[in-house]
Amino acid sequence: MVKRNPFTTANQVNNTLQGVGVSTSKSTIKRRLHESKYRGCTARCKPLISLKNRKARLDFAKEHLKKPAQFWKNILWIDETKINLYQNDGKKKVWRRRGTAHYPKHTTSSVKHGGGSVMAWACMAASGNGTLVFIDDVTQDRSSRMNYEVFRDILLAQIQLNAVKLIGRHFMIQMDNDPKHIAKATQEFIKAKKWKILEWPSQSPDLNSIEHVFHLLKTKLQTERPTNKQQLKAAAVKTWQSIKKEETQHLVMSMSSRLQAVIASKGFSTKY
């Protein structure tokens, strides 16, 4: 039953066995599964990736696999993230054997935009974290809606400042393919500033170093107990600043292994 449907619960197995006259306990069922090398694990949530984007991811991985460490150290990673006051991760348990976490039948699928929360823009590099900016602190109506104008104003205020601090004069910007990132007006603004952009494959948060730093931020935030947005912001800034250079450097320098994983999976999403 578990081999056919890894999301089968011990209760469901027990009910099916009882239906055919076999009486046992959930503990016995779990022991037998453990003897067969199955463990109850949280299912990895992986985005559904189109064939076109799988090819783009694979091409990107092959092209950048042999890039030297200095190439990745010269990149300023930028993105936005939603930080929730209360977490609801929707995780599911799955029975699987060791080394099969990323098998399609052992994962769930995620779709973007799925208590209170704040939207933040941030940047980082191998040498450490840059500025964390809350969107409602820079919009005229104090909302978290981020359009091209808001994005441009943040770039104008933060890119050069953080790049010089974290990298130096010669840097490249990495950002994903969010509509406001790739809008014509954004591209023209970046071109006018003479900033170099790393061409990035769509649907690739698993490759994106800042997404991993955001995950680290939210994991560390679980030890905090904010009860309102202001407390959440204060806790987020404190936690963001507490992330060590050794942690950001490790995440950026692991690009090679992440690219190898994309190649091995033929463009599918890897651990994230």
Image: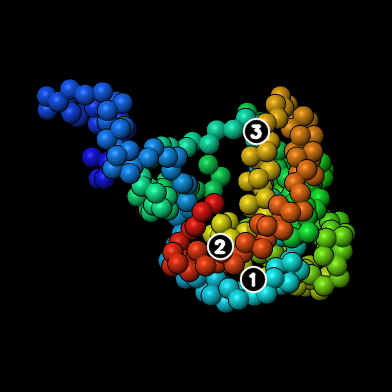
Question: In the image shown, does 157 or 7 lie closer to the viewer?
Answer: 7
Mark 3 lies on residue: 222
Quadrant position of residue 159:
bottom right
x then y, percent, for residue 231? 77, 29
On-image quarter of the N terminus: top left
Q: Contact (CB < 8 A) between labels 2 and 1?
A: no
Task: Tell me how far mark 2 sits from mark 3, CA to CA.
Answer: 26 Å
Closer to the chain start, of discs 1 and 3, is 1
Q: Classify residue 38 as left or right of residue 82.
A: left
Closer to the chain start, of discs 2 and 3, is 3
Task: Tell me how far mark 1 sits from mark 3, CA to CA.
Answer: 34 Å
Label of residue 199 in the image: 1
Amino acid type indicated by mark 1: Glu
Amino acid type indicated by mark 2: Arg
Q: What element carries label 3?
A: loop
Q: How many labels does the image show?
A: 3
Q: Classify residue 218 as left or right of residue 172.
A: left
Closer to the chain start, of discs 2 and 1, is 1
Query: Does 51 sit above or below residue 110?
Result: below
Q: Residue at x 19, y 29 (%)?
A: 16
Mark 2 packing: few (<14 Cα in 10 Å), some, or many (20+)?
Answer: many
Task: Tell me how far mark 2 sits from mark 1, CA to CA.
Answer: 17 Å
Question: In the image shown, does 260 or 44 lie closer to the viewer?
Answer: 260
Query: Does 92 sit above or below residue 180?
Result: above
Q: What element carries label 2?
A: helix
Quadrant position of residue 50:
bottom left
Q: Residue at x 75, y 59 (%)?
A: 125
Amino acid type indicated by mark 3: Gln
Evaluate whether residue 160 shows in this view: no
Mark 2 lies on residue: 258
